[in-house]
Image (cartoon, helix red, strand yellow):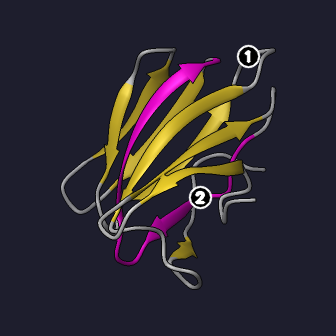
Amino acid sequence: MAPDGSEVRILAATARGSMAQFLLPAGKISIAVAHRTVEELWFFTAGQGQIWRKNEKAEEIVQILPGLSISIPVGTHFQFRNDGTDPLIAIGTTMPPWPVENEAYFVAGIWRI
């Protein structure tokens, strides 16, 4: 399980980055988190929902459909939800690779779990 409560499966890793699949079951909402040192790129492959992101420059909610790509810069607060009946699935690349502990920290999100 990822710190945000989604299911995670590591796909590949090198010294400079890692790639994983994230799955959020139908009707579920992730825990709002931010990252201390890593940035991520996500590509959604299945499902539908919304993702909220907030940093010092902007705050937005984006509709998720297959084919959407997003970035999650270091320190960005984010939370996502599955509004559909199928799993919400994303492939994410983390740079640098995900550290073992204490990378993610909990933040106030916009949706109640």
The kind of residue tagged 2 is Ala
- The location of residue 82, given as percent across then percent down, is 69, 28
Is 28 included in the stretch rendered in magenta?
Answer: no
Measure how far apart labels 1 and 2 are at the Cα level.
Answer: 19 Å
- The location of residue 64, given as percent across then percent down, is 50, 22
Q: Say above or below: 69 vs 46.
A: below
Residue visible at 65% across and 35% down?
Answer: 81
Question: In terms of secondary structure, where does tag 1 sit?
Answer: loop
The kind of residue tagged 1 is Gly
Is 38 included in the stretch rendered in magenta?
Answer: yes
Residue at the bottom extreme, as displayed: 102
Numbered circle sitting on residue 32: 2
Mark 1 neighbour density, 10 Å: few (under 14) some (14–19) many (20 or more): some
Q: Say above or below: 44 vs 106.
A: above
Indicate the quadrant where residue 21 lies.
Answer: top right
Residue visible at 73% across and 49% down?
Answer: 112
- The location of residue 7, given as percent across then percent down, is 74, 48
Q: Nearer the viewer, residue 37 or 60?
A: 37
Is 10 displayed left or right of 99 in the figure? right
Q: Say above or below: 3 vs 11.
A: below
Residue contact between numbered discs 1 and 2, judged by CB atoms under 8 Å: no
Magenta-drawn segment: 29-47
Is 1 displayed left or right of 80 in the figure? right
Residue at the left extreme, as displayed: 57
Residue at the spot of label 1: 84
Is 14 displayed left or right of 10 in the figure? left
Question: In terms of secondary structure, where does tag 2 sit?
Answer: loop
